[in-house]
Image: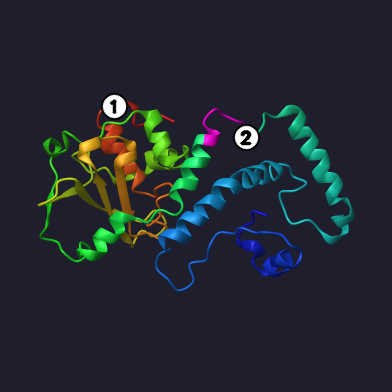
């Protein structure tokens, strides 16, 4: 059973019934999920999103969009069956098979046990504390940064959720010169650092590091690490995704910044 965190008190019962369960991890007192926990959680949410999407469709109906009084409990099953029948008959399917489904699934399974090597490098070399090793980036410094197509970006993010988020997030961070501040490592020009404001807490900023392998430039040779709660994962990037978009796509296709979806 693939469940959300609301089922946390039912896990023992599921085990007693002989059911294997998967649920997103809890952060507890940590500031950031470990790479393994963040990766496992992403697998769960990738499968569960369609459940939440259908729940959203059901709640578009007035009969189910609010708390139901106890007197209606005997009839809720009938309401749900009627509404689901209408959705099945007259609405398009919420999810469809595509030719890339098995490729995406296998890629996620291949990545789930992989450590975040860039995070290890950031911690070992103390890049969080050192300021003098970074210099502000100019447009001419990134001539050999990967130039990705829109399809390659979708493969990098394993879907379009991050891509859609990134559009508004990028517009929010553009400064008067048309670009947010990016810094490059003085001794290793394959490593970039960006500081961004949190999407959820305006008073909180996160550092993001991006590294590319110049010997074999493609979407599979971009590494990332962010200080946000899920920023250590390697199965789909977090907010640092939109930096990759600007550097690898939008700066070459500026007219698509507001129109691409």
Q: In the image, what residue occupies the spot 48% across and 67% down?
A: 27
**For numbered disc 2, what is the local secondary structure?**
loop
Q: Nearer the viewer, residue 137 or 115?
A: 115
Residue density around tag 1, few if under 14, some if 14–19, many if 20 or more, within 10 Å: few
Q: Position of residue 126 (x, y in %)?
A: 20, 65
Tell me the mark number nearer the camera, choosing from 1 and 2: 2
Report the magenta residues as a range.
95-102
Residue 221 got which mark? Answer: none
Q: Quadrant of the C terminus?
A: top left
Q: In the image, what residue occupies the spot 47% across and 38% down?
A: 159
Q: Which residue is mark 1?
A: 253
Q: In the image, what residue occupies the spot 60% across and 62% down?
A: 5
User: Viewed as shown, does residue 129 lie left or right of 24?
Assistant: left
For the stretch drawn in magenta, the main secondary structure is loop
Q: Earlier in the sequence, mark 1 or mark 2?
A: 2
Q: Position of residue 194 (x, y in %)?
A: 24, 51
Residue 95 got which mark? Answer: 2
């Amino acid at each position: 059973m693939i469940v959300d965190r609301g089922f946390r008190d039912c896990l023992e019962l599921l085990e007693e019934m002989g059911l294997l369960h998967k649920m997103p991890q809890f952060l507890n007192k940590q500031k950031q999920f470990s790479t393994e926990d963040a990766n496992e959680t992403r697998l769960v949410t990738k499968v569960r999103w369609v459940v939440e999407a259908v729940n959203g469709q059901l709640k578009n109906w007035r009969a189910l969009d609010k708390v139901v009084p106890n007197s209606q409990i005997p009839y809720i099953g009938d309401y749900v069956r009627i509404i689901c029948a209408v959705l099945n008959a007259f609405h398009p399917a919420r999810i469809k098979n595509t030719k890339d489904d098995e490729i995406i699934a296998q890629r996620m399974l291949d990545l789930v046990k992989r450590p975040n090597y860039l995070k290890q490098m950031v911690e070992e070399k103390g890049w969080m504390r050192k300021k003098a090793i970074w210099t502000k980036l100019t447009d001419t410094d990134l001539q050999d940064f990967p130039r990705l197509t829109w399809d390659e970006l979708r493969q990098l993010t394993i879907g379009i959720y991050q891509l859609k988020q990134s559009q508004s997030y990028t517009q929010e961070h553009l400064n008067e010169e048309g670009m947010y501040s990016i810094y490059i490592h003085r001794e290793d020009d394959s490593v970039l650092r960006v500081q961004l404001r949190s999407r959820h807490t305006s008073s909180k900023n996160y550092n993001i590091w991006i590294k590319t392998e110049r010997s074999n430039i493609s979407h599979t040779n971009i590494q990332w690490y962010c200080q946000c709660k899920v920023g250590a994962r390697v199965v789909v990037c977090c907010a640092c995704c939109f930096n990759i978009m600007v550097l690898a796509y939008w700066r070459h296709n500026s007219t698509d910044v507001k129109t691409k979806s």
